[in-house]
């Protein structure tokens, strides 16, 4: 091997490869392809949790329907304060959307969904009691029945066991 061919061979190897290594060292190289995520096993929700999800979905539909009624009354009527009326519509729609998301979470036995649903039921129970004592039992009684059914379904042993097993899964 001559000196010329050895030097040329070194230049070819060290030129682009050496520059690439320097760039990789300074800026970081290209990321490797990530490993495929393992398949998540979705345990079938017990019947009580499915029924609870359906009750929450009904509540979400009623809240969204109420938001539409409020929107109709705001648009066709003359509210004292338009900004307050619009805020009521937005809040009713927002609560309806959050309740619908919680219904989906219950259907999937997601651990995050149970707490907001119980909190919502307690708020609805207070509102229903207020409606009942204000002389409007036609609003208070149906809401109290839905609240009682929801809390009962979430307190059944199979529902509590489903969430206990979910929190004590293999990844914890």
Image (cartoon, grey):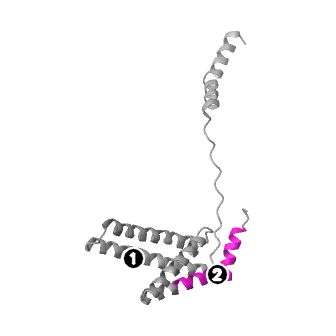
Magenta-span inclusion, residue 162:
yes
Q: What x and y, as percent, mark residue 88?
A: 39, 70
Mark yes or no: residue 19 visible. yes
Q: Which residue is mark 2?
A: 155
| Marking on residue 135 | none
Structural crowding at the residue carrying mark 2, measured as other residues with C-alpha within 10 Å and reported as few (<14), some (14–19) or many (≥20): some
Question: Which range of residues does the magenta coloring cover?
Answer: 145-168
Mark 2 or 1 closer to N-term? 1
The quarter of the picture where residue 116 lies is bottom right
Disc 2/disc 1 C-alpha distance (Å) = 28 Å
The quarter of the picture where residue 27 lies is top right
Residue at horizontal 51 percent and vertical 85 percent from the top: 144
Q: What x and y, as percent, mark residue 160?
A: 67, 77
Q: Which residue is mark 1?
A: 66
Mark yes or no: residue 107 visible. no
The dominant secondary structure in magenta is: helix
Above or below, 33 against 65 in this view is: above
Horizontal side of 170 relative to 128 (left or right) equals right
Residue at horizontal 63 percent and vertical 20 percent from the top: 12
User: Can you say which quadrant of the picture contains the C terminus?
Assistant: bottom right
Q: Depth check: 143 or 29 in front?
A: 143
Classify mark 1: helix, strand or loop.
helix
Residue at horizontal 50 percent and vertical 79 percent from the top: 124
Structural crowding at the residue carrying mark 1, measured as other residues with C-alpha within 10 Å and reported as few (<14), some (14–19) or many (≥20): some
The quarter of the picture where residue 21 lies is top right
Q: What x and y, as percent, mark residue 49?
A: 60, 78
Classify mark 2: helix, strand or loop.
helix
């Amino acid at each position: 091997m001559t000196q010329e061919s050895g030097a040329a061979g070194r230049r070819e190897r060290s030129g682009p490869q050496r520059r690439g290594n320097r760039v990789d060292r300074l800026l970081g190289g290209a990321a490797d392809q990530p490993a495929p995520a393992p398949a998540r096993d979705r345990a079938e929700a017990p019947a009580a949790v499915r029924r609870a999800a359906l009750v929450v979905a009904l509540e979400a539909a009623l809240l969204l329907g109420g938001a539409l009624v409020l929107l109709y009354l705001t648009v066709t009527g003359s509210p004292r304060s338009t900004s307050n009326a619009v805020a009521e519509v937005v809040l009713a729609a927002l609560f309806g959307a959050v309740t619908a998301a919680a219904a989906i979470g219950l259907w999937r036995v997601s651990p995050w969904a149970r707490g907001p649903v119980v909190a919502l039921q307690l708020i609805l129970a207070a509102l229903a009691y207020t409606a009942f004592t204000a002389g409007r039992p036609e609003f208070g009684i149906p809401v109290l029945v839905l609240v009682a059914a929801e809390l009962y379904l979430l307190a059944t042993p199979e529902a509590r066991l489903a969430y206990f097993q979910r929190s004590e899964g293999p990844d914890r």
